[in-house]
Image (cartoon, rainbow, N blue to C red):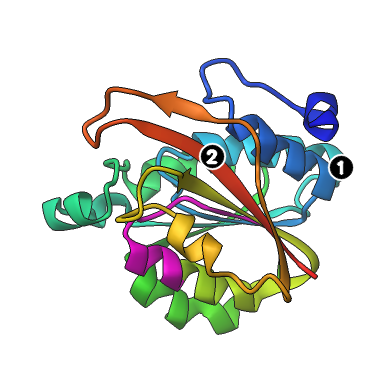
Amino acid sequence: MIYFLKHLLHFPGVPYRYDQLFAEVKKVRPKNIMEIGVWTGERARKMIGVASRFHPKGSLHYYGFDLFESMDNEKFTKEVSKQPPTIKIVEEKLKKTRANIHLYKGDTVMVLPDQEATLPKMDIVFIDGGHSLETIANDWFYVSKLLHQGSVVIFDDYWQNRLDAGSKVTVDLIDKEEYSVVILPIIDSFPKTAFGHLSIQLAKVTKL
């Protein structure tokens, strides 16, 4: 807990568990950031802002994956999701950071297999896309191929009280002989949501 108290960066209006994500960005000082589940791009903007403190302008790359305007009602329900804006709106926002922005539209079950060979090794990855067990397992499978020694992967939506969706099932199955897996301590609790009570943590995975 000492580490987090020392390094937390809190942005007003942002759930407190994300302080741990921004602390990891500050610690890792990434040049290549990958995010699955871009949504409005606001979290990406903050991660880029933290990372850009440590690198010359134009040297940081951000790779973001989302359904964007291709989200339909079926995907919305299956993935326990939120409706994202269009890829154009998000791209215009993120280009203002002066980082190199690479956005990919579509279902990661199809897009990640197609793009994996074209992507560099990532310094930090945040997984918060579709919430179905199938999608999260798929996202981890392909992300795991993009890691180098020292890469950090942060999973959102580690729900202690749900096994039908969220990242807990995938995270708990990760090989502990190959990866360090830590459930980060800050909990955001939401007692009244459309999905019932949610207690949400982040999980941090690093390659041993």
Q: State which tag comes first along the sequence, 1 or 2.
A: 1
Which dot marks residue 118?
A: none
- Residue at 44% from the left image edge and 61% from the top image edge: 169
Q: Looking at the image, which residue sits at the far front?
A: 161
In the rendered structure, find residue 201 and report the number of the disc placed on it.
Answer: 2
Q: Is residue 46 left or right of residue 91?
A: right
Q: Which residue is mark 1?
A: 54
Q: Secondary structure at mark 2?
A: strand
Query: Is residue 208 placed above or below 64 in the rendered structure?
Result: below
**Alpha carbons under labels 1 and 2: distance apart:** 27 Å
**Total numbered badges shown on the rendered structure:** 2
The quadrant of the picture occupied by the C terminus is bottom right
Tell me if residue 129 comes above or below residue 46 in the rendering. Answer: below
Q: From this viewpoint, is residue 120 visible?
A: no
Q: Position of residue 189 (x, y in %)?
A: 44, 26
Query: Is residue 196 visible in this depiction of the protein?
Result: yes
Residue in front for this viewpoint, 182 or 55: 182
In the picture, measured across the screen, residue 89 lies left or right of residue 154, that is left
Q: Residue at x 58, y 32 (%)?
A: 17
Residue placed most toward the observer, 53 or 147: 147
Q: Nearer the viewer, residue 124 or 5?
A: 5
Residue 126 highlighted magenta (yes or no) = yes
Graded by Cα atoms within 10 Å as few (under 14), some (14 to 19) or many (20 or more), the crowding at tag 2 reads many
Pick whichever, 147 or 118, lies toward us. 147
Boundaries of the magenta span: 125-138
Secondary structure under tag 1 reads helix
Q: Residue at x 27, y 47 (%)?
A: 80
Q: Residue at x 71, y 69 (%)?
A: 179
